[in-house]
């Protein structure tokens, strides 16, 4: 059985391999597949050795050999616009590179963006699995005539390509319900998406002595009775201002009446390439 597994190869297509929840999930999946004997390659439109998960680096600090970057020359946007269009184009370019360079694949996992499925079904005979985090058409704004017109072909393309996958997986029951309501025709005529929850590492050895040292040496006020912790990307849709308002309400009520002090920590993905990240952090600091 193990000898058969060693011969099997899995390819992953991911739009932008930075630091985030989706990236953590796909890297963990690649690590686990590799651990049980599969050979894994990951094609992406972007990966920076200065801002990435350590598993994607080799011992020499350079990009790991199983990470293949194609399409980085394409812009992410033009003047802050057309993000979705270029995300699709970068994924399609990475997919074309995969089709040219890879052979004898057992399965291809398409993550987040469904556009690659069109090329894969047209030019490859391998099974395709699509992992849907959330329908992109619901994340996009449709608040102007231009945006509505811009999204028409993208929304149609998303639904059509999602339906081409041999198997679709989602990350929760909530997303499965959202999937069924958004892609009504697909849901009615095809099998329901499977649910694959994001994995959480339970290996206690991952917590090193250096981590413990940092934690012990971190100084907090002795009078603190608790910590408010928010871990999210610095994007407006994450509504981090809610955490600020809740913390302010706490200070004005319980903290003032009972003399309890607490600290608010906002942590999460921040990318200086993304204008929204930069602008939103500035807004929160005001």
Image: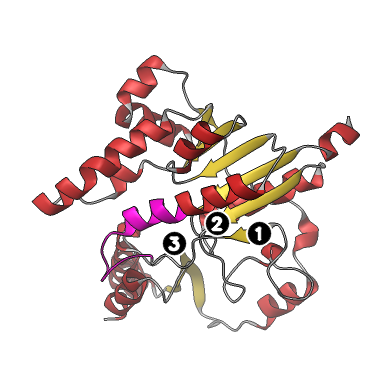
How far apart are labels 3 and 1 at the CA level? 25 Å
Label 2–label 3 contact, CB within 8 A: no
Depicted 254 relative to depicted 278: above or below = above
Depicted 81 relative to depicted 32: above or below = below
How far apart are labels 2 and 1 at the CA level? 8 Å
Asked which secondary structure carries label 3, the reply is loop
Mark sitting on residue 200:
none
x, y percentage for residue 251? 33, 72
Which residue does the numbered mark 1 point to in the structure image?
Answer: 67
Q: Earlier in the sequence, mark 2 or mark 3?
A: 2
Q: Which residues are magenta?
A: 76-91
Label 2–label 1 contact, CB within 8 A: yes
Asked which secondary structure carries label 1, the reply is strand
Q: Is residue 127 visible?
A: yes
x, y percentage for residue 225? 50, 71
Label 3–label 1 contact, CB within 8 A: no
Which residue does the numbered mark 3 point to in the structure image?
Answer: 232
The image quadrant where one finds the C terminus is bottom left
Q: Is residue 88 magenta?
A: yes
Pair 3/1: label in front: 1
Left or right placement of residue 48 versus residue 157 in this view:
right
How far apart are labels 2 and 3 at the CA level? 23 Å
Mark sitting on residue 44:
2
Q: Quadrant of residue 62?
A: bottom right
Pair 2/3: label in front: 2
Residue nearest the viewer, comparing 5 with 98: 98
Q: Residues within 10 Å of mark 3 (few under 14, many from 20)?
A: some
Left or right placement of residue 176 versus residue 237 in this view:
right
Q: Please tell me which residue is depicted at 32% across the width and 65% down the height of the picture.
A: 77
Residue nearest the viewer, comparing 236 with 221: 236
């Amino acid at each position: 059985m193990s000898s058969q597994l060693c011969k099997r190869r899995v390819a992953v297509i991911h739009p932008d391999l930075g630091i985030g929840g989706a990236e953590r999930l796909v890297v963990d999946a690649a690590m686990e597949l590799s651990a049980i004997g599969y050979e894994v390659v990951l094609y992406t439109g972007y990966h920076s050795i200065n801002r990435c998960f350590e598993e994607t680096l080799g011992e020499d600090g350079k990009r790991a050999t199983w990470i293949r970057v194609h399409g980085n020359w394409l812009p992410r946007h033009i003047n802050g616009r057309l993000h979705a269009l270029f995300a699709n184009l970068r994924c399609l370019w990475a997919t074309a590179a995969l089709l040219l360079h890879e052979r004898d694949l057992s399965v291809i996992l398409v993550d987040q963006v469904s556009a690659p499925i069109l090329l894969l079904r047209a030019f490859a005979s391998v099974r395709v699995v699509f992992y849907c985090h959330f329908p992109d058409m619901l994340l996009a704004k449709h608040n102007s005539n231009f945006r509505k017109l811009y999204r028409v072909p993208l929304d149609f393309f998303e639904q059509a390509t999602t339906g081409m996958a041999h198997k679709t997986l989602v990350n929760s029951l909530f997303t499965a319900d959202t999937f069924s309501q958004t892609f009504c025709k697909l849901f009615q005529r095809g099998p329901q998406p499977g649910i694959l929850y994001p994995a959480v590492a339970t290996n206690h050895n991952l917590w090193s002595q250096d981590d413990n040292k940092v934690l012990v040496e971190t100084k907090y006020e002795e009078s603190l009775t608790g910590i408010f912790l928010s871990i999210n990307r610095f994007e407006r849709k994450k509504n981090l201002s809610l955490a600020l308002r809740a913390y302010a309400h706490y200070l004005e009520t319980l903290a003032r009446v009972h003399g309890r002090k607490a600290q608010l920590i906002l942590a999460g993905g921040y990318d200086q390439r993304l204008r929204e990240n930069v602008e939103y952090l500035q807004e929160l600091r005001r």
